[in-house]
Protein backbone atom coordinates (compact mmCIF):
# COMPACT_ATOMS: atom_id res chain seq x y z
CA UNK A 1 0.00 0.00 0.00
CA UNK A 2 1.32 3.42 -0.92
CA UNK A 3 1.37 6.61 1.09
CA UNK A 4 -0.76 9.64 0.48
CA UNK A 5 -4.13 11.27 0.87
CA UNK A 6 -7.30 11.03 -1.20
CA UNK A 7 -10.07 13.60 -1.51
CA UNK A 8 -13.74 12.81 -2.19
CA UNK A 9 -16.82 14.81 -3.20
CA UNK A 10 -20.41 13.70 -2.63
CA UNK A 11 -23.27 15.64 -4.23
CA UNK A 12 -26.12 14.55 -1.97
CA UNK A 13 -29.77 15.49 -1.92
CA UNK A 14 -29.52 17.87 1.02
CA UNK A 15 -25.85 18.84 0.96
CA UNK A 16 -22.62 18.81 -0.99
CA UNK A 17 -19.82 17.21 1.03
CA UNK A 18 -16.06 16.96 0.76
CA UNK A 19 -13.74 14.73 2.76
CA UNK A 20 -10.02 14.03 2.97
CA UNK A 21 -8.89 10.54 3.95
CA UNK A 22 -5.67 8.65 4.44
CA UNK A 23 -5.11 5.42 2.54
CA UNK A 24 -5.77 3.60 5.83
CA UNK A 25 -9.28 5.05 6.00
CA UNK A 26 -8.68 7.74 8.62
CA UNK A 27 -10.63 10.93 7.99
CA UNK A 28 -8.43 14.03 8.01
CA UNK A 29 -11.18 16.59 7.61
CA UNK A 30 -14.69 17.07 6.23
CA UNK A 31 -16.72 20.05 5.05
CA UNK A 32 -20.23 20.44 3.75
CA UNK A 33 -22.66 23.03 2.47
CA UNK A 34 -26.42 22.86 1.81
CA UNK A 35 -27.64 22.27 -1.72
CA UNK A 36 -29.83 25.02 -3.14
CA UNK A 37 -32.68 24.25 -5.52
CA UNK A 38 -35.14 26.34 -7.48
CA UNK A 39 -38.15 25.93 -9.74
CA UNK A 40 -37.83 27.33 -13.28
CA UNK A 41 -40.21 30.16 -14.12
CA UNK A 42 -43.52 29.01 -15.51
CA UNK A 43 -43.33 25.47 -14.08
CA UNK A 44 -45.04 23.94 -11.06
CA UNK A 45 -43.02 23.37 -7.90
CA UNK A 46 -42.58 19.66 -8.66
CA UNK A 47 -39.97 20.80 -11.21
CA UNK A 48 -36.67 21.24 -9.34
CA UNK A 49 -33.23 22.23 -10.63
CA UNK A 50 -29.93 23.51 -9.29
CA UNK A 51 -27.51 26.05 -10.72
CA UNK A 52 -24.50 24.11 -12.08
CA UNK A 53 -22.14 27.09 -11.95
CA UNK A 54 -23.05 27.85 -8.34
CA UNK A 55 -22.77 24.18 -7.37
CA UNK A 56 -19.36 23.84 -9.02
CA UNK A 57 -18.13 26.98 -7.22
CA UNK A 58 -19.44 25.47 -3.99
CA UNK A 59 -17.54 22.24 -4.66
CA UNK A 60 -14.35 24.15 -5.41
CA UNK A 61 -14.72 26.12 -2.19
CA UNK A 62 -15.19 22.95 -0.14
CA UNK A 63 -12.08 21.38 -1.68
CA UNK A 64 -10.00 24.45 -0.84
CA UNK A 65 -11.47 24.52 2.68
CA UNK A 66 -10.60 20.87 3.28
CA UNK A 67 -7.07 21.25 1.93
CA UNK A 68 -6.49 24.24 4.20
CA UNK A 69 -7.96 22.58 7.31
CA UNK A 70 -5.89 19.44 6.73
CA UNK A 71 -2.74 21.50 6.16
CA UNK A 72 -2.26 20.02 2.69
CA UNK A 73 -1.11 21.31 -0.65
CA UNK A 74 -2.82 20.17 -3.83
CA UNK A 75 0.11 17.91 -4.69
CA UNK A 76 -0.35 15.98 -1.44
CA UNK A 77 -3.60 14.51 -2.79
CA UNK A 78 -2.88 11.37 -4.82
CA UNK A 79 -6.42 10.82 -6.10
CA UNK A 80 -9.92 12.36 -6.23
CA UNK A 81 -13.21 10.46 -6.31
CA UNK A 82 -16.78 11.65 -6.84
CA UNK A 83 -20.15 10.17 -5.86
CA UNK A 84 -23.70 11.49 -5.65
CA UNK A 85 -27.37 11.02 -4.95
CA UNK A 86 -29.10 8.55 -7.23
CA UNK A 87 -31.62 9.60 -9.84
CA UNK A 88 -30.20 13.07 -10.45
CA UNK A 89 -28.36 13.93 -13.65
CA UNK A 90 -27.01 16.71 -15.85
CA UNK A 91 -27.59 17.20 -19.58
CA UNK A 92 -24.66 18.58 -21.59
CA UNK A 93 -24.74 20.22 -25.00
CA UNK A 94 -22.24 19.62 -27.78
CA UNK A 95 -19.91 22.28 -26.34
CA UNK A 96 -19.86 20.61 -22.92
CA UNK A 97 -22.11 23.20 -21.28
CA UNK A 98 -24.96 22.31 -18.95
CA UNK A 99 -28.45 22.74 -20.37
CA UNK A 100 -30.20 21.07 -17.41
CA UNK A 101 -29.10 20.11 -13.89
CA UNK A 102 -31.70 18.22 -11.91
CA UNK A 103 -31.73 16.29 -8.62
CA UNK A 104 -33.71 13.17 -7.77
CA UNK A 105 -36.41 15.47 -6.37
CA UNK A 106 -37.37 16.69 -9.85
CA UNK A 107 -40.62 14.92 -10.80
CA UNK A 108 -41.76 17.22 -13.61
CA UNK A 109 -42.02 14.16 -15.89
CA UNK A 110 -44.81 12.44 -13.95
CA UNK A 111 -47.13 12.04 -16.96
CA UNK A 112 -44.32 11.08 -19.35
CA UNK A 113 -43.26 8.42 -16.85
CA UNK A 114 -46.81 7.10 -16.57
CA UNK A 115 -46.93 6.79 -20.35
CA UNK A 116 -43.70 4.76 -20.37
CA UNK A 117 -45.04 2.47 -17.65
CA UNK A 118 -48.36 1.94 -19.42
CA UNK A 119 -46.60 1.16 -22.69
CA UNK A 120 -43.52 -0.87 -21.67
CA UNK A 121 -43.33 -0.69 -17.87
CA UNK A 122 -42.95 -4.43 -17.30
CA UNK A 123 -40.05 -4.73 -19.73
CA UNK A 124 -38.35 -1.59 -18.39
CA UNK A 125 -38.58 -3.00 -14.86
CA UNK A 126 -37.16 -6.35 -16.02
CA UNK A 127 -34.22 -4.64 -17.70
CA UNK A 128 -33.43 -1.89 -15.18
CA UNK A 129 -34.96 -3.14 -11.93
CA UNK A 130 -36.57 0.26 -11.35
CA UNK A 131 -40.08 1.72 -11.38
CA UNK A 132 -42.01 4.07 -11.55
CA UNK A 133 -40.49 5.66 -14.63
CA UNK A 134 -41.33 9.28 -13.70
CA UNK A 135 -38.40 9.19 -11.25
CA UNK A 136 -35.79 8.45 -13.90
CA UNK A 137 -33.95 9.99 -16.84
CA UNK A 138 -35.94 8.56 -19.80
CA UNK A 139 -39.14 10.26 -18.62
CA UNK A 140 -37.41 13.60 -18.12
CA UNK A 141 -35.84 13.35 -21.57
CA UNK A 142 -39.34 12.75 -22.97
CA UNK A 143 -40.56 15.79 -21.01
CA UNK A 144 -37.94 18.00 -22.66
CA UNK A 145 -38.85 16.68 -26.11
CA UNK A 146 -42.50 17.54 -25.47
CA UNK A 147 -42.17 20.77 -23.49
CA UNK A 148 -38.78 22.31 -24.27
CA UNK A 149 -37.76 21.16 -27.78
CA UNK A 150 -35.12 23.91 -27.99
CA UNK A 151 -33.30 22.29 -25.06
CA UNK A 152 -33.97 18.75 -26.31
CA UNK A 153 -32.29 19.53 -29.62
CA UNK A 154 -29.12 20.67 -27.84
CA UNK A 155 -28.67 17.58 -25.62
CA UNK A 156 -25.47 15.71 -26.44
CA UNK A 157 -24.80 13.70 -23.23
CA UNK A 158 -26.50 12.51 -20.05
CA UNK A 159 -24.36 12.27 -16.91
CA UNK A 160 -25.33 11.10 -13.40
CA UNK A 161 -24.45 13.81 -10.90
CA UNK A 162 -21.33 12.11 -9.52
CA UNK A 163 -20.04 11.64 -13.07
CA UNK A 164 -20.80 15.30 -13.79
CA UNK A 165 -18.50 16.28 -10.92
CA UNK A 166 -15.91 13.92 -12.39
CA UNK A 167 -16.37 15.64 -15.75
CA UNK A 168 -15.89 19.08 -14.19
CA UNK A 169 -12.61 17.88 -12.66
CA UNK A 170 -11.25 15.96 -15.65
CA UNK A 171 -13.07 17.16 -18.77
CA UNK A 172 -13.83 13.50 -19.60
CA UNK A 173 -17.45 12.53 -20.39
CA UNK A 174 -17.63 9.12 -18.72
CA UNK A 175 -20.40 7.34 -16.82
CA UNK A 176 -20.04 4.73 -14.07
CA UNK A 177 -22.10 1.60 -14.76
CA UNK A 178 -24.04 1.34 -11.49
CA UNK A 179 -24.81 5.08 -11.54
CA UNK A 180 -26.20 4.88 -15.08
CA UNK A 181 -28.40 1.95 -14.03
CA UNK A 182 -29.73 4.09 -11.16
CA UNK A 183 -30.89 6.80 -13.59
CA UNK A 184 -32.61 4.19 -15.77
CA UNK A 185 -30.22 4.26 -18.75
CA UNK A 186 -28.32 0.98 -18.41
CA UNK A 187 -29.63 -2.56 -18.08
CA UNK A 188 -28.86 -4.75 -15.08
CA UNK A 189 -27.06 -7.46 -16.99
CA UNK A 190 -24.95 -7.64 -20.11
CA UNK A 191 -24.11 -4.30 -21.63
CA UNK A 192 -25.28 -5.79 -24.93
CA UNK A 193 -28.81 -5.17 -23.64
CA UNK A 194 -28.13 -1.43 -23.58
CA UNK A 195 -29.43 -0.87 -27.12
CA UNK A 196 -32.55 -2.95 -26.37
CA UNK A 197 -33.31 -0.73 -23.38
CA UNK A 198 -32.54 2.56 -25.14
CA UNK A 199 -34.76 1.66 -28.09
CA UNK A 200 -37.55 0.76 -25.67
CA UNK A 201 -37.41 4.13 -23.90
CA UNK A 202 -36.68 6.27 -26.99
CA UNK A 203 -33.22 7.43 -25.91
CA UNK A 204 -30.53 8.13 -28.53
CA UNK A 205 -27.55 5.87 -27.81
CA UNK A 206 -25.27 8.75 -28.83
CA UNK A 207 -26.21 10.52 -25.56
CA UNK A 208 -24.63 7.76 -23.49
CA UNK A 209 -21.22 8.54 -22.02
CA UNK A 210 -18.27 6.18 -22.34
CA UNK A 211 -18.63 3.56 -19.60
CA UNK A 212 -16.30 3.07 -16.64
CA UNK A 213 -16.33 1.15 -13.35
CA UNK A 214 -16.05 2.31 -9.76
CA UNK A 215 -12.42 2.40 -8.68
CA UNK A 216 -11.23 3.02 -12.25
CA UNK A 217 -9.31 6.14 -13.27
CA UNK A 218 -11.57 8.22 -15.49
CA UNK A 219 -9.14 11.06 -16.21
CA UNK A 220 -6.89 13.65 -14.60
CA UNK A 221 -7.52 17.02 -12.99
CA UNK A 222 -7.31 19.63 -15.73
CA UNK A 223 -5.36 22.87 -15.43
CA UNK A 224 -8.67 24.77 -15.26
CA UNK A 225 -10.02 22.56 -12.45
CA UNK A 226 -6.68 22.77 -10.66
CA UNK A 227 -6.87 26.56 -10.65
CA UNK A 228 -10.40 26.48 -9.27
CA UNK A 229 -9.90 23.83 -6.58
CA UNK A 230 -6.28 24.08 -5.48
CA UNK A 231 -5.64 20.49 -6.52
CA UNK A 232 -2.61 19.71 -8.65
CA UNK A 233 -3.13 19.38 -12.39
CA UNK A 234 -2.68 15.76 -13.45
CA UNK A 235 -4.07 14.30 -10.20
CA UNK A 236 -5.97 11.07 -11.04
CA UNK A 237 -9.75 11.39 -11.00
CA UNK A 238 -11.39 8.11 -9.96
CA UNK A 239 -14.94 6.94 -10.70
CA UNK A 240 -17.17 6.42 -7.69
CA UNK A 241 -20.78 5.35 -8.08
CA UNK A 242 -24.24 5.90 -6.56
CA UNK A 243 -24.11 7.09 -2.95
CA UNK A 244 -25.95 4.09 -1.49
CA UNK A 245 -23.81 1.44 -3.20
CA UNK A 246 -20.67 3.42 -2.33
CA UNK A 247 -22.03 3.55 1.23
CA UNK A 248 -22.30 -0.26 1.21
CA UNK A 249 -18.60 -0.33 0.46
CA UNK A 250 -17.95 2.03 3.37
CA UNK A 251 -19.86 -0.37 5.65
CA UNK A 252 -17.90 -3.37 4.38
CA UNK A 253 -20.98 -4.88 2.72
CA UNK A 254 -19.47 -6.45 -0.38
CA UNK A 255 -20.34 -10.17 -0.26
CA UNK A 256 -23.62 -11.90 -1.21
CA UNK A 257 -25.99 -12.06 1.75
CA UNK A 258 -24.69 -8.85 3.27
CA UNK A 259 -27.30 -6.21 4.13
CA UNK A 260 -26.52 -2.51 4.34
CA UNK A 261 -28.83 0.05 5.99
CA UNK A 262 -27.83 3.61 5.13
CA UNK A 263 -29.96 5.95 7.23
CA UNK A 264 -29.44 9.56 6.25
CA UNK A 265 -31.91 11.99 4.69
CA UNK A 266 -33.62 8.87 3.30
CA UNK A 267 -33.34 5.25 4.44
CA UNK A 268 -32.41 2.73 1.73
CA UNK A 269 -31.66 -0.90 2.61
CA UNK A 270 -29.72 -2.95 0.09
CA UNK A 271 -28.92 -6.66 0.12
CA UNK A 272 -26.01 -7.96 -1.95
CA UNK A 273 -26.74 -10.82 -4.38
CA UNK A 274 -24.70 -12.86 -6.87
CA UNK A 275 -27.06 -12.01 -9.71
CA UNK A 276 -29.94 -9.58 -10.30
CA UNK A 277 -33.07 -10.51 -8.30
CA UNK A 278 -36.12 -8.72 -9.66
CA UNK A 279 -39.28 -8.85 -7.56
CA UNK A 280 -42.21 -10.47 -9.36
CA UNK A 281 -44.56 -8.09 -7.51
CA UNK A 282 -42.51 -5.00 -8.48
CA UNK A 283 -42.26 -3.77 -4.87
CA UNK A 284 -38.49 -3.37 -4.68
CA UNK A 285 -35.63 -2.06 -6.81
CA UNK A 286 -32.67 -3.95 -8.19
CA UNK A 287 -29.35 -2.39 -9.11
CA UNK A 288 -25.67 -3.01 -9.71
CA UNK A 289 -23.25 -2.95 -6.79
CA UNK A 290 -20.08 -0.94 -7.36
CA UNK A 291 -18.25 -4.24 -6.73
CA UNK A 292 -17.89 -6.08 -10.03
CA UNK A 293 -20.01 -9.22 -10.32
CA UNK A 294 -22.38 -8.20 -7.53
CA UNK A 295 -25.91 -6.82 -7.58
CA UNK A 296 -28.22 -5.36 -4.95
CA UNK A 297 -31.91 -5.65 -4.22
CA UNK A 298 -33.28 -2.59 -2.46
CA UNK A 299 -36.23 -1.71 -0.24
CA UNK A 300 -36.31 1.81 1.16
CA UNK A 301 -38.05 3.65 3.99
CA UNK A 302 -37.99 6.71 1.68
CA UNK A 303 -38.07 9.25 4.52
CA UNK A 304 -35.65 9.04 7.45
CA UNK A 305 -33.58 12.02 8.59
CA UNK A 306 -36.00 14.44 6.94
CA UNK A 307 -38.85 13.17 9.11
CA UNK A 308 -36.73 13.31 12.27
CA UNK A 309 -35.60 16.84 11.50
CA UNK A 310 -39.22 17.89 11.00
CA UNK A 311 -40.36 16.57 14.37
CA UNK A 312 -37.32 18.10 16.09
CA UNK A 313 -38.13 21.51 14.61
CA UNK A 314 -41.82 21.12 15.44
CA UNK A 315 -41.02 20.26 19.06
CA UNK A 316 -38.43 23.04 19.34
CA UNK A 317 -35.47 20.69 19.73
CA UNK A 318 -31.97 20.81 18.29
CA UNK A 319 -30.59 17.86 16.34
CA UNK A 320 -28.33 17.07 19.30
CA UNK A 321 -31.32 16.73 21.62
CA UNK A 322 -32.97 14.02 19.53
CA UNK A 323 -32.27 10.67 21.24
CA UNK A 324 -34.02 7.39 21.92
CA UNK A 325 -34.75 6.98 25.62
CA UNK A 326 -36.68 3.78 26.44
CA UNK A 327 -39.77 4.14 28.59
CA UNK A 328 -39.73 3.33 32.25
CA UNK A 329 -40.84 -0.21 33.06
CA UNK A 330 -44.57 -0.27 33.81
CA UNK A 331 -45.37 2.75 31.62
CA UNK A 332 -48.27 1.55 29.50
CA UNK A 333 -48.48 4.51 27.13
CA UNK A 334 -46.71 4.65 23.81
CA UNK A 335 -46.71 6.90 20.76
CA UNK A 336 -46.58 5.48 17.24
CA UNK A 337 -44.91 7.51 14.51
CA UNK A 338 -46.06 7.57 10.87
CA UNK A 339 -44.14 10.59 9.60
CA UNK A 340 -43.00 9.30 6.21
CA UNK A 341 -40.87 6.17 6.75
CA UNK A 342 -42.65 3.35 4.94
CA UNK A 343 -42.35 -0.21 3.70
CA UNK A 344 -41.48 0.12 0.05
CA UNK A 345 -43.89 -0.72 -2.73
CA UNK A 346 -42.50 0.74 -5.95
CA UNK A 347 -45.98 0.59 -7.51
CA UNK A 348 -47.22 3.10 -4.90
CA UNK A 349 -44.66 5.87 -4.50
CA UNK A 350 -46.98 8.85 -3.98
CA UNK A 351 -48.17 10.73 -0.92
CA UNK A 352 -49.61 8.83 2.02
CA UNK A 353 -51.48 9.66 5.19
CA UNK A 354 -49.49 9.82 8.41
CA UNK A 355 -48.98 11.48 11.74
CA UNK A 356 -48.55 10.48 15.39
CA UNK A 357 -50.86 8.03 17.18
CA UNK A 358 -51.11 7.87 20.98
CA UNK A 359 -53.74 7.23 23.67
CA UNK A 360 -56.05 10.08 24.60
CA UNK A 361 -57.18 12.10 26.47
CA UNK A 362 -53.73 13.63 26.65
CA UNK A 363 -54.56 15.16 30.03
CA UNK A 364 -54.72 11.63 31.41
CA UNK A 365 -51.95 9.88 29.47
CA UNK A 366 -49.47 12.75 29.73
CA UNK A 367 -47.64 11.94 26.48
CA UNK A 368 -44.37 13.84 26.73
CA UNK A 369 -42.15 15.45 24.13
CA UNK A 370 -39.67 12.60 24.60
CA UNK A 371 -42.40 10.03 24.00
CA UNK A 372 -43.18 11.71 20.67
CA UNK A 373 -39.48 11.57 19.74
CA UNK A 374 -39.37 7.91 20.77
CA UNK A 375 -42.44 7.26 18.62
CA UNK A 376 -40.81 8.88 15.58
CA UNK A 377 -37.57 6.92 16.07
CA UNK A 378 -39.42 3.66 16.60
CA UNK A 379 -41.54 4.41 13.52
CA UNK A 380 -38.32 4.64 11.50
CA UNK A 381 -36.91 1.48 13.08
CA UNK A 382 -40.17 -0.40 12.43
CA UNK A 383 -40.12 0.73 8.77
CA UNK A 384 -36.54 -0.54 8.58
CA UNK A 385 -37.71 -3.92 9.87
CA UNK A 386 -40.57 -4.08 7.36
CA UNK A 387 -38.17 -3.37 4.51
CA UNK A 388 -35.56 -5.74 5.96
CA UNK A 389 -38.06 -8.61 6.03
CA UNK A 390 -39.19 -7.76 2.51
CA UNK A 391 -35.62 -7.94 1.19
CA UNK A 392 -35.06 -11.34 2.73
CA UNK A 393 -38.31 -12.51 1.09
CA UNK A 394 -37.42 -11.15 -2.37
CA UNK A 395 -33.80 -12.37 -2.27
CA UNK A 396 -34.76 -15.75 -0.85
CA UNK A 397 -31.88 -15.47 1.62
CA UNK A 398 -31.37 -14.58 5.26
CA UNK A 399 -29.01 -11.66 5.74
CA UNK A 400 -25.62 -13.00 6.82
CA UNK A 401 -24.23 -9.68 8.07
CA UNK A 402 -25.98 -6.35 8.70
CA UNK A 403 -24.19 -3.01 8.40
CA UNK A 404 -25.62 0.31 9.61
CA UNK A 405 -24.37 3.71 8.53
CA UNK A 406 -25.48 7.24 7.72
CA UNK A 407 -26.02 10.44 9.67
CA UNK A 408 -28.97 9.15 11.73
CA UNK A 409 -26.63 6.69 13.44
CA UNK A 410 -25.36 9.72 15.36
CA UNK A 411 -28.70 9.81 17.21
CA UNK A 412 -28.08 8.46 20.69
CA UNK A 413 -29.58 5.00 21.19
CA UNK A 414 -30.64 4.54 17.56
CA UNK A 415 -28.18 1.76 16.68
CA UNK A 416 -29.25 -0.27 19.71
CA UNK A 417 -32.92 0.36 18.87
CA UNK A 418 -32.41 -1.02 15.34
CA UNK A 419 -30.59 -4.10 16.66
CA UNK A 420 -33.40 -4.77 19.17
CA UNK A 421 -36.17 -4.27 16.59
CA UNK A 422 -34.47 -6.53 14.02
CA UNK A 423 -33.36 -9.05 16.60
CA UNK A 424 -30.03 -9.21 14.73
CA UNK A 425 -26.46 -8.31 15.49
CA UNK A 426 -25.49 -5.20 13.55
CA UNK A 427 -22.19 -3.55 12.71
CA UNK A 428 -22.14 0.25 12.79
CA UNK A 429 -19.77 1.85 10.29
CA UNK A 430 -16.46 3.23 11.56
CA UNK A 431 -17.19 6.50 9.80
CA UNK A 432 -20.81 7.54 10.24
CA UNK A 433 -20.64 9.03 6.74
CA UNK A 434 -20.20 5.64 5.09
CA UNK A 435 -20.58 7.15 1.61
CA UNK A 436 -17.57 9.45 1.95
CA UNK A 437 -15.50 6.57 3.33
CA UNK A 438 -16.66 4.29 0.50
CA UNK A 439 -15.68 6.92 -2.07
CA UNK A 440 -12.25 7.14 -0.40
CA UNK A 441 -11.97 3.37 -0.88
CA UNK A 442 -12.75 3.77 -4.60
CA UNK A 443 -10.06 6.44 -4.83
CA UNK A 444 -7.54 4.21 -3.04
CA UNK A 445 -8.15 1.41 -5.56
CA UNK A 446 -7.86 3.85 -8.44
CA UNK A 447 -4.40 4.99 -7.35
CA UNK A 448 -3.18 1.41 -6.85
CA UNK A 449 -3.13 1.34 -3.05
CA UNK A 450 -5.42 -1.74 -3.09
CA UNK A 451 -6.10 -4.34 -5.77
CA UNK A 452 -9.88 -4.41 -5.48
CA UNK A 453 -12.82 -2.68 -3.81
CA UNK A 454 -13.39 -5.54 -1.31
CA UNK A 455 -9.70 -5.40 -0.39
CA UNK A 456 -9.96 -1.64 0.17
CA UNK A 457 -13.10 -2.14 2.29
CA UNK A 458 -11.21 -4.58 4.48
CA UNK A 459 -8.09 -2.43 4.70
CA UNK A 460 -9.78 0.92 5.29
CA UNK A 461 -12.98 -0.06 7.09
CA UNK A 462 -11.33 -0.51 10.47
CA UNK A 463 -13.06 -1.86 13.55
CA UNK A 464 -16.83 -1.44 13.39
CA UNK A 465 -19.02 -1.01 16.45
CA UNK A 466 -20.70 -4.34 17.13
CA UNK A 467 -24.22 -4.07 18.62
CA UNK A 468 -25.97 -7.16 19.97
CA UNK A 469 -29.78 -7.21 20.36
CA UNK A 470 -31.31 -7.41 23.82
CA UNK A 471 -33.84 -10.25 23.90
CA UNK A 472 -36.07 -8.79 26.62
CA UNK A 473 -36.32 -5.38 24.96
CA UNK A 474 -36.81 -7.08 21.61
CA UNK A 475 -39.88 -8.96 22.82
CA UNK A 476 -41.58 -5.75 23.91
CA UNK A 477 -40.66 -4.05 20.65
CA UNK A 478 -41.98 -6.99 18.66
CA UNK A 479 -45.41 -6.44 20.23
CA UNK A 480 -45.25 -2.73 19.40
CA UNK A 481 -44.12 -3.52 15.85
CA UNK A 482 -47.19 -5.68 15.27
CA UNK A 483 -49.42 -2.82 16.46
CA UNK A 484 -47.50 -0.35 14.29
CA UNK A 485 -47.83 -2.69 11.30
CA UNK A 486 -51.59 -2.97 11.79
CA UNK A 487 -52.04 0.81 11.94
CA UNK A 488 -49.67 1.25 8.99
CA UNK A 489 -51.84 -1.08 6.89
CA UNK A 490 -55.00 0.85 7.74
CA UNK A 491 -53.34 4.18 6.89
CA UNK A 492 -52.20 2.65 3.60
CA UNK A 493 -55.81 1.72 2.84
CA UNK A 494 -56.96 5.26 3.66
CA UNK A 495 -54.23 6.72 1.44
CA UNK A 496 -55.32 4.48 -1.43
CA UNK A 497 -58.92 5.64 -1.19
CA UNK A 498 -58.11 9.35 -1.37
Image (cartoon, rainbow, N blue to C red):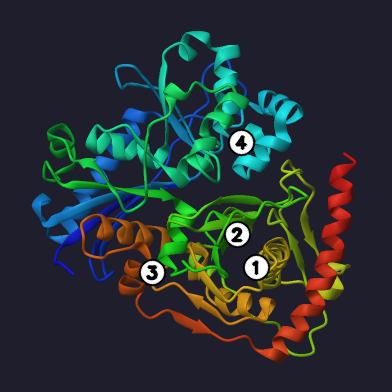
- Which SS class for mark 1? helix
How far apart marks 2 and 4 lie (CA) works out to: 24 Å
User: Which of pointers 1 and 3 lies earlier in the amino acid sequence?
Assistant: 1
| Number of other residues with Cα within 10 Å of mark 2, as a class: few under 14, some 14 to 19, many 20 or more | many
- Percent across and percent down for residue 292 are 43, 56
Task: Tell me if I can see residue 10 in this picture.
Answer: no
402 shown above or below 345: below
- Residues under numbered marks 2 and 1 in contact, where contact means CB atoms less than 8 Å apart: yes
- Looking at the image, is mark 1 or mark 3 nearer the viewer? 3
- Residues under numbered marks 1 and 4 in contact, where contact means CB atoms less than 8 Å apart: no
- Looking at the image, is mark 4 or mark 3 nearer the viewer? 4
**Residue identified by numbered label 2:** 308
- Which SS class for mark 2? helix
Q: Residue at x 74, y 26 (%)?
A: 119
Side (left or right) of 491 relative to 393: right
- Percent across and percent down for residue 456 are 32, 67
- Percent across and percent down for residue 237 are 24, 46
User: Which of pointers 2 and 1 lies earlier in the amino acid sequence?
Assistant: 2
**Residue identified by numbered label 4:** 135
How far apart marks 1 and 3 lie (CA) works out to: 21 Å
Q: What mark, if any, has residue 431 been given in the picture?
A: 3
**Residue identified by numbered label 1:** 377
User: Which of pointers 2 and 3 lies earlier in the amino acid sequence?
Assistant: 2
User: Which of pointers 1 and 4 lies earlier in the amino acid sequence?
Assistant: 4
| Number of other residues with Cα within 10 Å of mark 1, as a class: few under 14, some 14 to 19, many 20 or more | many
- Residues under numbered marks 1 and 3 in contact, where contact means CB atoms less than 8 Å apart: no
Side (left or right) of 401 relative to 208: right
- Looking at the image, is mark 1 or mark 4 nearer the viewer? 4
Amino acid sequence: MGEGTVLVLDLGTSSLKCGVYSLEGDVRTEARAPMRYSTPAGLSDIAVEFDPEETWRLACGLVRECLEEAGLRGGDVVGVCTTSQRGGFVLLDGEGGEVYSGPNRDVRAFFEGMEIDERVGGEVYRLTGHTPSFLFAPARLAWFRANAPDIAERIAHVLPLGDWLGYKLSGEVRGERSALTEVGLLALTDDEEADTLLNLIDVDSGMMPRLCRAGEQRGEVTATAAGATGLAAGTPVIAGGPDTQVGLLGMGVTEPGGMGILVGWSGPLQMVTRGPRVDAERRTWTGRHVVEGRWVVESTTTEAGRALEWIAQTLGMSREEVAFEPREEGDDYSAFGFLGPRIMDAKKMGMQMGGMMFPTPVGHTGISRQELVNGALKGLAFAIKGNFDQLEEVSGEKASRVGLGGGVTRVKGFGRLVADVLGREIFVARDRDATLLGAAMCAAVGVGAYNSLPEAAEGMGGEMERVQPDGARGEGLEEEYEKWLEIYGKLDEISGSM
